[in-house]
Each structure stands twice: as C-alpha cells, then as structure tokens.
Image (spheres, rainbow, N blue to C red):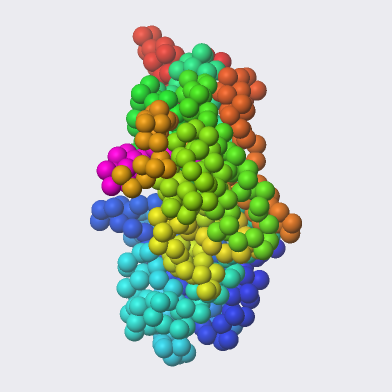
Amino acid sequence: MSCFSERRRRLTSQLSGIPVILANGWERLRNPSNTYNFRGESHVIYLAGKLPAGAFITLNGDDVRVYLEPVSVDDAVWSGPGESWEVLAERHEASIRPLSELGGYIGELGRDQWASLPVQDPKAQAYLTDLLGRSPNFKQYERDRKLAEAMVECRLINDEFSIAELRRAGKLSVEAHFAGVQVVSRHAARVSRRANDERDVLTAMMEVLHWQGAEVSFAPIITIAGERLHQPHIGGSLNSGSLLLVDFGAETENGWAGDITNTWPLCGEFKPEERAVFDTVVAAYNACVSMLKPGRRYLDVHMRAAEVLAEGLKDMGILRGSTAELLERDAHAFFFPHGIGHLMGLDVHDMEDLGDIAGYQKGRVRSKRFGLNCLRLDRDLRAGMALTVEPGIYFIPELLDNPQIRAEYKDCIDWDRVEKYRGVRGIRFERDHLITADGSECLTPGLPANADEVEKLMDAYDWHPIPVLTCIPPANDDENMNDEDFGIIPV
Ligand SMILES: [Mn+2]
C-alpha cells in the first residue's frame, strides 16, 4: 500500500489541470569527482519517495513520469549499475523515461503551461529554467504560486504514512538523545569517562542513527555555549562548561525529520540559577503544550510562552514591572529572541523553501518586532499538523552588553541581577507534537520532563546499556596492545 497516488491526487485536484514539473536536484560537487551526500528535494520525496540524483518528476492528471539520466558504462564501472527502471517504476509508481526526452514532453504540452517550484541545487534550477524558458518563481508567476499553495495544503496535514514516519523520526531522535546523555552522565563518568568534549557526544548520538539507517535532519547543535542559538562548532571541552545544550534531530530513511533539544547539567545536578531558569523554560513548554488543539492560533501559543518566561524572569529578579507591559516593550525577547516553534515534516523547518506561504496562513504577515520576527509559524492549528514547541532562555552578550539596550530598559531589567544568571548561558527545551482532534500527541516521548527527572537520569543509568566502542584489534595480536589502547570498556 502506498501513499503516493493519494498525495498526487490531493495536489493536482487543487491545480485545475495545470501540469507540474519538479526537480530532485543533482549531487553537489565537493571536487570534480567527489560529491557531498545526496538528498533529494522534499517536494519530490513527498510525491514519489527518494529518487536518484538528477531526476525530474512530471504530473499531468494521472500521467506521472520520472525522467532520469541513464547510467553510463563509465558510471556503472565506478558506482554500479543502479536499480533497473522496472524496479524504479514499480516503487515510485511512475513511468521512467530518459532525461533526453523531457524537453520534447515539456514542449508538447506547451512550455508556458507548466507550474514548478525552485530547487536548492543550482544545476537543476538552471536546467528547469532552460526547459520552461523562465526560472520557477512562486512570487512572480501565478502558476507557480498556485502550486506552492497546493503543496503547502497537502504537506501541512500529515497522512497516516507521514505520521508513522514522524513517530519513527521522533523515536530515533529520543534514542539518540539518551545515547548522548549517557556518555556525559555520572554513571558513564564512574565506569569510564567516555565523553571529554562535545564531539564525543555527537559520536554517541550518530551511532544510534547510523546503525538504524537514519541520518540527521539538520546540522546538530551540541554545545556548552547554550547562549548561541545555532552554535555551528562542535568540539568544546566539556570540562569548561556547566550545561550542555543538545539540539539534535533524526531523519528517517524515508526522509522525515525529528527535532529535540535537551540541556544537560554536566556535573549531574543543576546549580540553583540553572534550575530556576530550567524550571521556567519547562513551565513555558507545559503551558504551551496544554494549549495545542485545532483552532488555536500559534501566535497565541508563542505569546503564552513569552508570558510564562517573563513571569519566571520576574521571579528571578531579572525583569520587573507588569508582565503585560514587559511583553508590550519586548523586554522578554532579550532573553527569548526566537519563535516558540515551527512546522515539522520532510524538512525540519518544514517547507521553509516556500517562504512564509507555509508558516503563515493567508492574510497574516510576519511581524517586524524583535523576537516575533523569528516566529516561523502563525497559523490556526489543524489536526494532522506537526510542529515543535521549544521555549528557551538565553544570556546573549551581544544583546545584554549593548549600551543602548541597557539604557533604554534600565527601569525594567535589573542588569546587576542579569550578572548573577549570566553563567547559565542558555537553556532550551524542545519536543515535537502532532495536532490531534482534541489536543496533541507528543512525537518524542520518554525523555525527562523536568529538572528532577533530568538529575535522576544523570545519576542512575544502570537500566540503559552503555554503548561499547567496537574496535577490533588486528589478528596478529601485538602483545603490547591492550584494551585501554582502544578505549574499550571491559564488559
Ligand atoms: Mn526546532
């Protein structure tokens, strides 16, 4: 049983007969004979699954075609012959044709008749531009805009197949987080100090994904510098940090994403300031989750998070004054400068390639206000939508040390009190949710839900097996080698 025909029917039924062409993209070159890992375009994966690099898919009523470059003898020598077109035709439910015939087919229906969407790969984008006599552009061309809107309408509401994939992505992400925390946990420290720096945590997490055929859904953030919202560098020593922020998500073999953030206390316990911030962030998360249901405006979920975070910051003595006024002046946003979450699906920020057509429903535009300008989603929620809830509190030097901000907000931000909490750096808490008929389902269940559970997990790991590095010594045993040389934990 497959989902493709129903998805295609849902898409084309909104397009009043406009034929569609979409590119999967080619591999990006790293140097002339080496490529980066290939992943096709999400719109194509949605409609036909994972096709080879260089594929194009066309939809014209029930006539669904995939155009491909035949594998040359030279390519087969180096990389194998690939799958037969019969196999591809059956799996992807399309007739497979050589790419050389695509131009003729486009012309047959009239090259100005087609709708298309931009692709990330510049070579495929140029190829489409050549085929259509224009570049795909949903801001400029009516047909492309219709297609973009129809695609959003389809992908926004998950079907049973994509829900199963999202649950699996969630489960893989949860498992990876457990693997990551156990190498920094006290138990791991007692037995063998496996994690010395952030890379060791990454290694443990990737192991979980790779042996199950999964990948990451975005560049992982594993950092002791939690105040950096998307810290790209992984490699800092764990000894120089107090908290470790881990924002890491799996991508299933079929291309669907998970996205989870945990913040772990590296010594096993939160310091008082850390706990105060953590408790506030979790309170904001819980307040938001209790609001999730069809009909709820997501902006209101964001504002509820802002309110709970502001109240927590007031309790810490960092903010003062009426909460309403603090929110009105965006004072909370210096500590919570991003949105409360985003759509989830084949992309971790689902369909962000279509700009705010996906995240913002018709008639709504993204605010320019500080904080709200980073809100990626403002729709009325509907059953079947998948999204993240990810409040955080950060102490970002670039914002907090700005003399202008300090002067302007000196009446409502206690800058001395900020210094007391600055060492907390940053805490984020993120889970994925599917909107159901009357609420939401957590797609990433099982991880600690509060500070006590985090500390308990850090302290007692016996129920969870410690992964053992599998490094097999060479057959001609060197007598001078022993297990310690390989970092093997004796079991
Ligand atoms: Mn996220």
Q: How many marks?
A: 0
Seen at 71% across and 54% down, the residue is 439
Residue 393 falls within the magenta-colored stretch: yes
Q: Nearer the viewer, residue 256 or 411?
A: 411
**Bounds of the magenta segment:** 392-406
Q: Nearer the viewer, residue 465 or 87?
A: 465
Q: Is residue 324 above or below residue 5?
A: above
- Specify the quadrant that holds the N terminus: bottom right
Seen at 40% across and 28% down, the residue is 420
Q: Is residue 163 above or below residue 181?
A: below
Q: Residue furthest left?
A: 32
Q: Residue furthest right?
A: 438
Residue 51 seen from this side = no
Q: Quarter-wise, where is residue 220 in the image?
A: top left
Pinpoint residue 346: horizontal percent, then vertical percent. 53, 58
Pinpoint residue 112: horizontal percent, then vertical percent. 41, 88
Left or right relative to 370: residue 160: right
Pinpoint residue 175: horizontal percent, then vertical percent. 58, 36
Seen at 31% across and 44% down, the residue is 407
Pinpoint residue 343: horizontal percent, then vertical percent. 54, 57
Seen at 57% across and 64% down, the residue is 379
Q: Residue furthest top?
A: 479
Residue 186 seen from this side = yes
Residue 216 falls within the magenta-colored stretch: no
Q: Nearer the viewer, residue 176 or 108?
A: 176
Q: Quarter-wise, where is residue 308 in the image?
A: top right
- Specify the quadrant that holds the C terminus: top right
